Amino acid sequence: MSYDLIVIGGGPAGYLAGERAGAAGLKTLVVEERFLGGVCLNEGCIPSKTLLHSAKIYDYARFSEKYGVTAENVAYDHAKVIKRKNKVVKTLVGGINAKLKAYKVDVVKATGQILGRSSEGYQVAAGDQIYTGKRLLIATGSSAIIPPIPGAKEGFEAGFVVTNREILDLEEVPKSLVVIGGGVVGLEMASYFNSAGSKVTVIEMLDHIAGQTDGDIAGILLKNYQKKGITFHLSAKCTEVKSDGVVFEAGGRQEFIAADKVLISVGRRPNTSGIGLETIGVELEGNAVKVDEYGKTNVPEVYAAGDVNGYSMLAHTAYREAEVCINNMLGRRDTMRYNAIPAVIYTNPEVAGVGETEATCRAKGIDCEVVNLSMRYSGRYVAENEGGDGICKVLINKKYRSVIGVHMIGNPASEIIYGAAMLIESEMRLEDVKELVFPHPTVAEIIREAIFEF
Ligand code: NAI
């Protein structure tokens, strides 16, 4: 069977590319070996947010005396939460299926393997069929890294060690959970299992949590979670996974922590092997498929989008990269920009940021000015966050007087940050931002407050 486009991988990059290509009239095939929606929808963004929402309701029910609300006999049913999570995922996967169908996109559930190229196009084996595509889009995503720590692989095989995939399906809340890696996955899961009743310990190699997040914000998040009872070992290296716990090294000392489960969340690696990229000579950069700003690889009519290119392993980046690829395939020039991609950590409180941080400005030699404002300047925040210690930082480029970064901790930062991304993407100058009207009372007004401090 011949197609205008074969998409390998049905995650956010792959399914969105399928939808856009189908809508534009390209005869399209999406090959997906597991489930449409990929990691994001099946074992990442959506399931974790479903779990975290239940945890948030539970926390509100238990800790709302300060708002004048008390409740008795509040119980948490993890099994029911997981059941609901599965229902949410099923509904959304069904939606993707329906949309692809509506755009007349074919979907094959099989592992796609590139076999080579002929005068007709690229051959891709999937199941017991061979398909030909005039164009290819590689959207095979990424996989959780299991580092070469002694005992980690064996622990994983025994089910004692889990990744983002297995942890979302645990039937019971473990009494104790050790999280190796205090990045996004580690923190969101630490947050969930702390609320759900586990004794959680996070082991992080760096001297701070939350990776590239603004340092002050990461510090506030750390304090919030220490207050909630999570133990953090920073500048700590896990050296061994035993059958009943984890050994780590910090400050020249070795320690053992017992655990019922261990989550490994030390990053992800692009899925580039075993799909036949070498048969057509696709160039890699490290582990990732090398692409230009149009999403093109070094091979004609072969594109790549999403985690597989290793640039910014986020579903929303993948969506935009997929659109850029499809637009260029259709002859509409479109380029990918990475300067205004929001990053969110869906802990409670939420963390969100976009654009430059003080650290990246220093590294790039950008002369920036920073305003750091307490979220308590927002009336809505004070009304809804008793005792909240959130902050909002706005960075401007001193030379151009334009907004280049916004970073915040405090609810609901995740829902506000896109507005900041728009200011950055459109290179708005302070004077123009000052003319914008923000609805009152909203937490988003904190950005307006900060802007008037310059
Ligand atoms: P990550 O890169 O965010 O964090 C990994 C952390 O593990 C780092 O802080 C690193 O220093 C630490 N680490 C590495 N090796 C270690 C070791 N041996 N011992 C102790 N610590 C160690 O990776 P993570 O959390 O696994 O997330 C993977 C990807 O998924 C990220 O690219 C992230 O952007 C994406 N993601 C995004 C979410 C969101 O947008 N809310 C949610 C979940 C994942």
Image (spheres, rainbow, N blue to C red):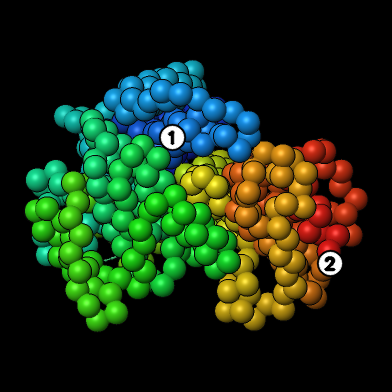
Determine which quarter of the picture holds residue 363: bottom right
Residue 317 vs 94, above or below: the answer is: below
The label on residue 365 is none
Q: Is residue 25 left or right of residue 424?
A: left
The label on residue 454 is 2
Res 200 visible: yes
Of residues 184 and 257, the one nearer the viewer is: 257
Q: Is residue 125 left or right of residue 334?
A: left
- Element type at marker 2? loop
Of residues 212 and 79, the one nearer the viewer is: 79
- In three-dimensional space, the C-alpha distance between marks 1 and 2, rounded to whole angstroms, equals 38 Å
Of residues 103 and 256, the one nearer the viewer is: 256
**Ligand 1: which quarter?**
bottom left
Q: How far from the left and from the top, in percent, is residue 402?
A: 79, 64
Q: How far from the left and from the top, in percent, is residue 283?
A: 34, 63
Q: Residue type at mark 1?
A: Ala
Dot 1 corresponds to which residue?
55
- Element type at marker 1? helix
Q: How far from the left and from the top, in percent, is residue 313?
A: 43, 53
